[in-house]
Image (tube, rainbow, N blue to C red):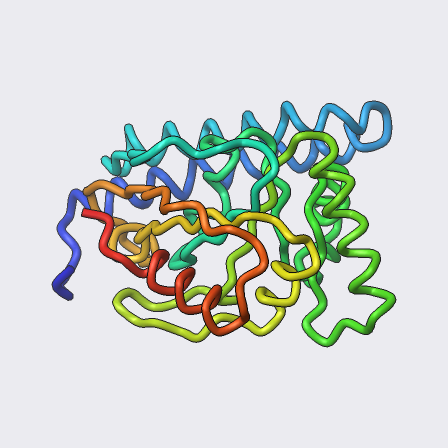
Amino acid sequence: MEDRSPTLAEIVRSLVFYAVFYGFTVLLLLVLAVVLIVAPRGVFAMVQAWTGVHRALVRHVLGIRVEVVGTPPQEGVFYALRHESFFEAIDLPQVLHRPCIFAKIELMRIPVWGRAGWAYGLIGVEREAGAKTLRAMLTHARARLAEGRPLVIFPEGTRVPVGQRYPLQSGFAGIYKLLSLPVVPVAVHSGALYHRVWKRRGTIRYVIGETIPPGLPREEIEARVLDAITAPTA
């Protein structure tokens, strides 16, 4: 998308979005602090409410439509998503049922939010993890799979600028091999609309790619996933 100055309407819509969404987030965190003590399983309903409010604001305030192309399987798979903005990290529970996301361990150390993440079932990832930490991470992942929850990873390891391709983090292939699960790559290009101060109207699409079987060599799985998640969504 071309680089241009924001319109007055884009500025107003973005300011309203920030005020409502982040105001709601602060209130939610205050309630979460209590819920985590008295009824930890209530975190699932609260996450669904948070992501639902976000989706509604994205559609009705920012003017961004969200479409899912294809039918995402919900159990026994390992999703690999393109990561261009915070949009997909927040929105995933609106697409998948209680997704179990591999998240940076630093995020899990944020007061209240981090504790809520553990209660929800996020998996903390330490890039320099030793064998003991890796085993604990995989044990956690298998426990969530046994509950019928899909696993999700952003294999690039960080947000990637629009139009660029970063090599996948080496840990992705290792987790793929150890879990021995089919991978569902998902292209979602949100950066041009959402990853900017003044957000723009348009459509963000999740394009569910062809399921890739387990057991492939590292070079092949990385190449197939990277090609799929960086493919155009329109």
Position of 33 with respect to 81 (left or right) is: right
Q: Position of residue 79 (x, y in %)?
A: 51, 47
Q: Quadrant of residue 49?
A: top right
Residue drawn at (31%, 57%) of the image:
191
In the rendered image, is residue 26 in sight? no
Q: Quadrant of residue 110?
A: bottom right
Q: Is residue 48 above or below residue 188?
A: above
| 2 lies above or below 202 | below
x and y, in percent, of residue 78 in the image: 56, 47
Q: Is residue 181 left or right of residue 192?
A: right
Count of labels in the image = 0
In-front residue for pair 210/198:
210
Residue at point 15% right, 66% down?
3
Residue that appears at 40% across and 74% down: 166
Q: Which x, y percent locates residue 154?
A: 51, 58
Q: Where is residue 221 drawn, in percent x and y?
A: 48, 64
Q: Quadrant of the N terminus?
A: bottom left
Q: Above or below — where is 173 with respect to 179?
A: below
Question: Is 229 on the left or on the right of 171, as rendered?
Answer: left
Q: Judge from the rendering whether residue 91 lies leftward or rightward of residue 35; answer left or right.
A: left
Q: Residue at x 16, y 43 (%)?
A: 9
Q: Is residue 177 visible?
A: yes
